[in-house]
Image (spheres, rainbow, N blue to C red):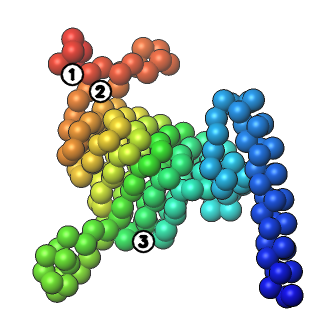
Amino acid sequence: MREDNSFNEVERWKSVFREAYEKREKELMELYQRSLPFQDAMFDREERARKLGFGKGATIYNSALVYGDVTVGERTWIGPYVLLDGSGGGIWIGSTCSISAGVHIYTHDTVGWALSGGRQPYRRKPVRIGNCCHIGSQSVILAGVEIADRCVVAANSMVNESVPPQTILGGTPARRIGHVEYHGDEPVLVLEGRGGG
C-alpha cells in the first residue's frame, strides 16, 4: 500500500512539472519561436548568473556546467551546454562576450599525465578571454590561452595559443583567418584571402 502511495505521489509531481513545462514551452514558442529542454526553459538564466557571482546582466543557461574558479563580466551571455572548467587555474571572461552553445574552456590537461603513466602532474594554467569577444559554437579553448579584446573564434575551432586584440580565428588548431576593423562604431569582419587584409 505504501509503495502505491509513493508511486502516485511521484506521478502527481511529474504531472505538475509536465504541465508547467508545457505552459512555459508554449510561451517561449510564442515569444521567441524556440523550444528548450526542461532545465533551460524552467530556470532563469540571469538569476543563475547572479548566484554564480557573474557580472550585472550576465546570463548562463542551466545546462551549462561551471567548475572551479570562474569569473564572468557584465552582460556576457553563456549559451546552452557550455563547459567552463576553471579547476586548473581559473577562467576570466570579460564583459559583453558571447560564449556560444557547446563551447568548452579548460584550465588543465591530462595529456602528459596519461602518456607518462601518471608520473607527470596535470598541466594547469588559467584562461583569459577579453571584453567584447565572440566564441563560436562547439569551440574548445585550452589551458593557458589568452584571447585579447574584440576577438572572434569561428565555430568548431580549437584554440591552443594566445592571440592579440581584434583577431578572427578559425580551424583546428585555430589560426588567424582575419581581423576586426571599426568604421565608426560599426565592427567589420575582414577575412584574409578574400579581398580583405
**Amino acid type, callout 1:** Glu
Vertical order, 38 against 76 (above or below): below
Return the residue at label 1: 192
Q: Is residue 65 above or below residue 93?
A: below
- Whether residues under marks 1 and 2 lie with C-beta atoms below 8 angstroms apart, the answer is yes
- The amino acid type, in three-letter code, at marker 2 is His
Residue to which mark 2 is pinned: 179
Q: Name the side, left or right, on which 130 lies relative to 109.
A: right
Q: Which residue is mark 3?
A: 87
Q: Residues within 10 Å of mark 1 (few under 14, many from 20)?
A: few
Crowd rating for badge 3 (residues with CA inside 10 Å; few <14, some 14–19, many 20+): some
**Location of residue 150 in the rendering, given as x and y in whole percent from the top left corner:** 41, 35
Q: Secondary structure at mark 2?
A: strand
Instruction: Specify whether residue 55 is in view.
Output: no
Say few, some or many: other residues with alpha carbon within 10 Å of mark 2 (under 14 / 14 to 19 / 20 or more). Answer: many
Picture coordinates of residue 123, whole percent (x, y): 25, 72
**Which residue is farthest left?**
116
Position of the N terminus, as image quadrant, is bottom right
Looking at the picture, does residue 71 appear above or below residue 45?
below
